[in-house]
Image (cartoon, grey):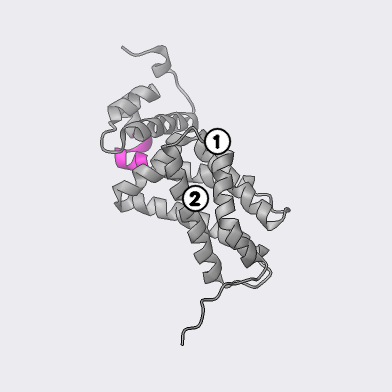
Amino acid sequence: MRTEGRAKRLPRAVRERQIMDAAVDVFSRLGFHAASMDEISEVAGISKPMLYAYLGSKEELFATCIRREATRMMEAIATGVEPEQEPDVQLWSGLRAFFGFVGENRASWQVLHRQASTQGGPFAAELADMRGRAVSLVAALLTQSTKAPATKLEAESLAAALVGAGESLAEWWLDHPEEPAGVVAARLMNLVWMGFGDLVEGNVWHPPSRR
């Protein structure tokens, strides 16, 4: 039996947001393969034919969810960075924004990282695109803040290391939700800034020469 809410007409943008909210919830709880369009339509409060009409197949819906959640996360990080501050504060504000987003949107991170990374194919490509945007953002921060000129490859390689560390720590955090976001962010900040701090000042470690 349909409820009054199921029959209500909504603007397309509002309906699509409602569907994606429901899909993120279901995908994060059940995983891509176990999630059904029946359950997503039930959570969204619409019929299954309407679900297909708005956002297509389950594969298309999942890819759309990945893109939306990745965009939301990148916007949160970009907004959180304080470009007028010193390099360490810029990095700290970016890490705090990232872990703040993950903490407040755990279902989003489940879909973005755990689900997308295990499905492969086009979903892995969506995840790679998100990671590339994150690396570019961090690389730009490093390039702007270092006193010793860094090449594009140097900045990107360091940024990739930081993004990878952040993803791994966020994944660990999902299994330890009792840890506050600020504490987790501070741990990564202490780990990376001890090295990045020297790089920003132009101090570089060199391996010992071997005779």
| Front one among 26 and 148 | 148
Q: Residue furthest right?
A: 84
- How far, Cα to Cα, is label 1 from label 2? 15 Å
Residue 63 showing in the rendered view? no
Magenta segment: does it hold 59? yes
Q: Is residue 111 left or right of residue 134?
A: left
Q: Is residue 191 left or right of residue 148?
A: left
Where are the magenta residues, as a range? Answer: 53-63
Of tags 1 and 2, which is closer to the observer?
Answer: 1
Q: Is residue 110 left or right of residue 73?
A: left
Residue 166: mark: 2
Magenta segment: does it hold 97? no
Callout 2: helix, strand or loop? helix
Residue 79 showing in the rendered view? yes
Q: Position of residue 122 (x, y in %)?
A: 33, 51
Residue 180: mark: 1
Picture quadrant of residue 32? top left
Tell me the residue at 55%/38% (across/down).
181
Q: Specify the quadrant that holds the N terminus.
A: top left
For badge 1, the amino acid type reads Pro
Q: Around disc 2, counting alpha carbons within 10 Å, would you say few (fewer than 14), some (14 to 19), or many (20 or more)?
A: some
Q: Is residue 115 above or below residue 34?
A: below
Disc on the earlier residue, 1 or 2: 2
Callout 1: helix, strand or loop? loop
Q: Are the residues tagged 1 and 2 within 8 Å (C-beta)?
A: no
Q: Position of residue 105 (x, y in %)?
A: 49, 35
For badge 2, the amino acid type reads Gly
Tell me the residue at 36%/46% (across/down).
116
Q: Position of residue 146 (x, y in %)?
A: 66, 66
Instruction: State whether the magenta stretch is mostly helix, strand or loop.
Output: helix
Q: Residue furthest bottom?
A: 211
